[in-house]
């Protein structure tokens, strides 16, 4: 048996070499017969050898396994060689291939019903015959696929074919019209459907991989045809229908591959948003994978600097990102979610907000309100990540509109945006995120002041103060909050006398009530600046400035005494030196109430205290006082008007 | 020659998605000896990124910083220079150079690095230099309009510091430099 096989094989070797040589030397087809005869011979040989090979797969004692493997391989190669010979035969043109060769070969492939042979032979056919033959016989070739054994990896066979055709299309621009002409895409799509129908037991991963292969082909050959791409996704959606969230991890991986391919090809999420079936495919990802995919989408936007420029696009995009933006029914509870991961995701969503842009003001406002609507459904934990970037985007929009008087009929105006801002910041304060909300109210107040909207600015300040009174209890947070309130108020010029007085009074009142005396002192002398606004038309009330400074001095004194009592020595004199510097500041501004006498007095007070036994040594204070004195000396030596005024101040160096 | 990077007020992610790409490509790990930031990074990811550029990172607290442990101010010595860092929202009026000079006297430093206004400033006065590196991302500020992203690189060499300011204007990085010399003081 074995000997016969080998002999047969060797004979074939000789014969095929013989044929090749005869044909090459041009010795007649007339001598030995027609091309048809040669083809017939090879086809018969092919068929017989294949049958032999298939039979051999399943025979033989176990102990001779290795030798049998070797023989099987050799026979397999010989079988394949037949096909190679067929492809090389002169005279085997497209028509011969189409009418004779391919049908006969495929007949044998299907009928042998052997999975290894079928896979090998399909692969051979695809590799060995030219691509334009495949194009012209596409339907026939694909027609064999559903008839193959269910265990054959038909996905790989078909993707090999599709890859060859893609490469063929890429090789020359003249190929594409041919592809369109033979309706390659339509044939491949329907072949995929037929294969899936023919194998009802095909696991989901197989079906999805087929679609991935088809999509890869489509993206390479028909990249401009979004409708084709959408069609492939749609076919996959149909297959996934009713399956809910796919649990098989291999199938999930293929779904992710399906979704990632258009993202990577187009590098433009806006294009991907036009694929109506995209979100439907994404629905079938389990919760975790869906979030991962959403992150990939956002990263694509950030990397490619893609602008999302309309409210409709925002809607479509946020639909894809919904597992990140809100809690769906299938989502795990908040306790199960890792905090750090959650923060990272939400910060990524926050970054995304900056890509939602349109220069047209009306559209931009629509974008903001649309995003706000989506974020509003995100639950309290998300708001402090997602709302602030919206707020700053809105403040930027206000700036664009500043100065244009659009009138009350306009779809977007600073007033309307401030209403949006008000309710957005309000949502934050109920999260609760009072410190953040306070900061944002102050941002809005300053912006409203720049727009000359006094009532709006007043309202924002009111909300900030209310938050301070009701929600901010931590002493350190109070200190910062007061700094921000005073700093903002010092910069707002929109208020009339009454409103300004109310707010200033509140600010100074709260400053004096901070817990620690040094904090009180500093906040109170900071308030002095509320009575001295530099710019045109701003309040300049020297009396009130001095009152603040004197109050600060009293607090500093009280702090010293407290320290003396509780610690046994006076506290550091830093506060006094700070207040001295403030005196100098106002002295230079020319406030009549801040006299050189006052400064002299304070200078001497500090100098005396520093030398007192009661005072704890403090290098920092010494250095501060020294640099302050140096400053005064420097000002005195300048030789200008200021130096004139400084002349009455004596600076005594310490011993 | 000691290179010190000063940048702040990035406000990521509330006001900006990231550093400008052109800045990012310039900032390469291993080239800088110290990084100083007056604050408002604002999230851990930005801190970690800066740390990856240079392990010696000094950050003071901005009012939006997520990490509450950053100090209100910091002092350090680099070469012959004493540097002070403070975000600046604590100093009222905001951006007022005289008030910042007072802080400088209080911290007793030659160079004060501060932020908050998002506007680049390098101000020399008899007590030293005040540098505001601006906003590295060009973030929105209620205080300043039309901000270009900017940061500062200081080259400290003996008693001299050259301050390079990098500004992103219309997509191009423009560089300017300012020289400061510290007067030799008696010990």
Image: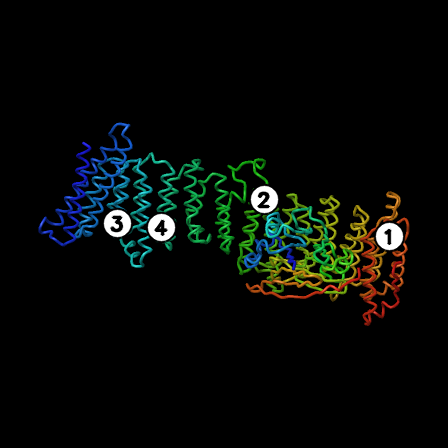
Which is more N-terminal, label 1 or label 4? 4
Question: Quadrant location of residue A416?
Answer: bottom right
Q: What residue would you read off at disc 2?
A: A343
At 12% from the left and 46% from the top, the residue drawn is A37
Q: Decide: is A242 above or below B41.
A: above
| Disc number lying in front (4 or 3) | 3
Q: Is residue A176 left or right of residue A8?
A: right
Q: Which residue in the structure is indicated by mark 3?
A: A134
> Residue A599: percent from the left, percent from the top?
87, 61
Marked residue chain, label 4: A
Report helix, strand or loop for mark 3.
helix
* Left or right of residue A615, residue A157 in this image: left
- Front of the two marks 3 and 1: 3
Q: Identify residue for label 4.
A: A218
Q: Which one is earlier in the sequence, the residue at label 2 or at label 3?
A: 3
- Distance from disc 4 to disc 1, alpha carbons, whole Å, reads 81 Å
Q: CA distance from mark 3 to mark 1?
A: 97 Å
Q: Secondary structure at mark 2?
A: helix
User: In this rendering, is residue A632 above or below A345?
Assistant: below
């Amino acid at each position: 048996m074995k000997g016969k096989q080998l002999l047969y094989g060797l004979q074939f070797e000789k014969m095929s070499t013989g044929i090749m040589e005869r044909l090459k030397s041009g010795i007649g087809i007339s001598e030995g017969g027609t091309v048809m005869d040669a083809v017939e011979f090879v086809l018969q040989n092919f068929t017989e050898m294949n049958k032999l090979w298939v039979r051999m797969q399943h025979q033989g004692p176990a102990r001779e396994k290795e030798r049998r493997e070797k023989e099987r391989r050799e026979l397999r190669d010989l079988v394949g060689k037949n096909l190679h010979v067929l492809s090389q035969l002169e005279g085997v043109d497209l028509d011969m291939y189409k009418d004779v060769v391919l049908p006969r070969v495929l007949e044998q492939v299907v009928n042998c019903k052997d999975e290894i042979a079928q896979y090998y032979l399909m692969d051979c056919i695809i590799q060995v015959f030219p691509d334009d033959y495949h194009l012209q016989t596409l339907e026939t070739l694909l027609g064999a696929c559903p008839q193959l054994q269910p265990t054959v990896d038909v996905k790989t066979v078909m993707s090999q074919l599709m890859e060859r055709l893609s490469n063929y299309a890429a090789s020359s621009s003249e190929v594409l019209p041919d592809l369109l002409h033979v309706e390659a895409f339509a044939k491949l799509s329907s072949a995929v459907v037929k294969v899936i129908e023919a194998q009802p037991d095909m696991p989901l991963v197989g079906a999805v991989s087929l679609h991935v292969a088809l999509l890869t082909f489509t993206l390479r050959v028909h990249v401009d045809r979004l409708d084709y791409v959408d069609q492939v996704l749609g076919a996959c959606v149909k297959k996934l229908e009713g399956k809910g969230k796919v649990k098989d991890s291999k199938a999930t991986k293929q779904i992710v591959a399906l979704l990632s391919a258009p993202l990577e090809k187009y590098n433009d999420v806006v294009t991907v948003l036009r694929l109506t079936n995209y979100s439907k495919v994404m629905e079938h990802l389990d919760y975790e994978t869906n979030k991962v995919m959403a992150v990939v989408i956002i990263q694509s936007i950030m990397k490619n600097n893609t602008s999302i420029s309309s409210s409709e696009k925002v809607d479509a995009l946020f639909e894809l990102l919904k597992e990140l933006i809100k809690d769906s029914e299938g989502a795990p509870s908040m306790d199960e979610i890792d905090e750090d991961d959650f923060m990272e995701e939400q910060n990524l969503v926050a970054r995304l907000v900056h890509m939602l842009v349109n220069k047209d003001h009306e559209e931009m406002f629509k974008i903001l309100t649309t995003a706000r609507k989506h974020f509003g459904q995100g639950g309290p934990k998300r708001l402090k990540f997602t709302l602030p970037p919206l707020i700053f985007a809105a403040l930027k929009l206000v700036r664009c509109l500043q100065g244009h008087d659009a009138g009350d009929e306009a779809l977007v105006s600073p007033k309307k945006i401030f209403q949006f801002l008000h309710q957005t910041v309000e949502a934050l304060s109920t999260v609760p995120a009072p410190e953040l909300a306070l900061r944002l109210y102050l941002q809005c107040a300053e912006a409203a002041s720049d727009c000359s909207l006094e009532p709006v600015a007043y309202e924002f300040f009111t909300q900030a103060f209310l938050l301070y009174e009701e929600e901010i209890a931590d002493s350190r947070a109070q200190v910062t909050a007061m700094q921000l309130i005073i700093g903002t108020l010092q910069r707002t010029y929109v208020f009339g006398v009454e409103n300004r007085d109310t707010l200033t009074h509140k600010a100074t009142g709260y400053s004096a009530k901070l817990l620690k005396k040094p904090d009180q002192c500093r906040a109170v002398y900071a308030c002095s600046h509320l009575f001295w606004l530099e710019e045109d038309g701003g309040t300049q009330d020297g009396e009130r400035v001095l009152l603040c400074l004197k109050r600060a001095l009293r607090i500093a004194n009280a702090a010293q005494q407290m320290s003396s009592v509780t610690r046994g020595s006076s506290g550091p004199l830093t506060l006094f030196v700070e207040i001295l510097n403030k005196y100098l500041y106002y002295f230079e501004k020319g406030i009549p109430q801040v006299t050189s006498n006052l400064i002299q007095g304070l200078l001497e007070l500090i100098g005396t205290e520093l030398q007192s036994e009661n005072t704890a040594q403090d290098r920092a204070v010494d250095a501060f006082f020294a640099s302050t004195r140096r400053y005064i000396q420097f000002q005195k030596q300048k030789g200008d008007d200021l130096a004139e005024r400084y002349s009455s101040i004596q600076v005594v160096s310490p011993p | 020659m000691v290179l010190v990077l000063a940048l702040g007020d990035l406000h990521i992610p509330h006001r900006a998605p990231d550093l400008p790409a052109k800045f990012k490509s310039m900032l390469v790990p291993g080239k800088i000896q110290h990084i100083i930031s007056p604050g408002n990074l604002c999230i851990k990811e930005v801190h970690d990124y800066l740390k990856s550029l240079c392990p010696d990172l000094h950050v003071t607290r901005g009012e939006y910083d997520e990490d509450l442990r950053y100090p209100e101010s910091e002092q350090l010595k680099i070469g012959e220079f004493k540097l002070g860092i403070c975000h600046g929202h604590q100093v009222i009026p905001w951006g007022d150079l005289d008030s910042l000079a007072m802080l400088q006297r209080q911290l007793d430093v030659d160079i004060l690095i501060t932020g908050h206004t998002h506007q680049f400033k390098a101000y020399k006065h008899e007590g030293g230099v005040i540098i505001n590196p601006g906003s590295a991302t060009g973030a929105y500020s209620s205080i300043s309009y039309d901000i270009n992203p900017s940061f500062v690189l200081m080259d400290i060499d003996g008693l001299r510091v050259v301050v390079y300011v990098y500004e992103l204007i219309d997509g191009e990085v423009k560089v300017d430099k300012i020289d400061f010399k510290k007067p030799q003081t008696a010990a």
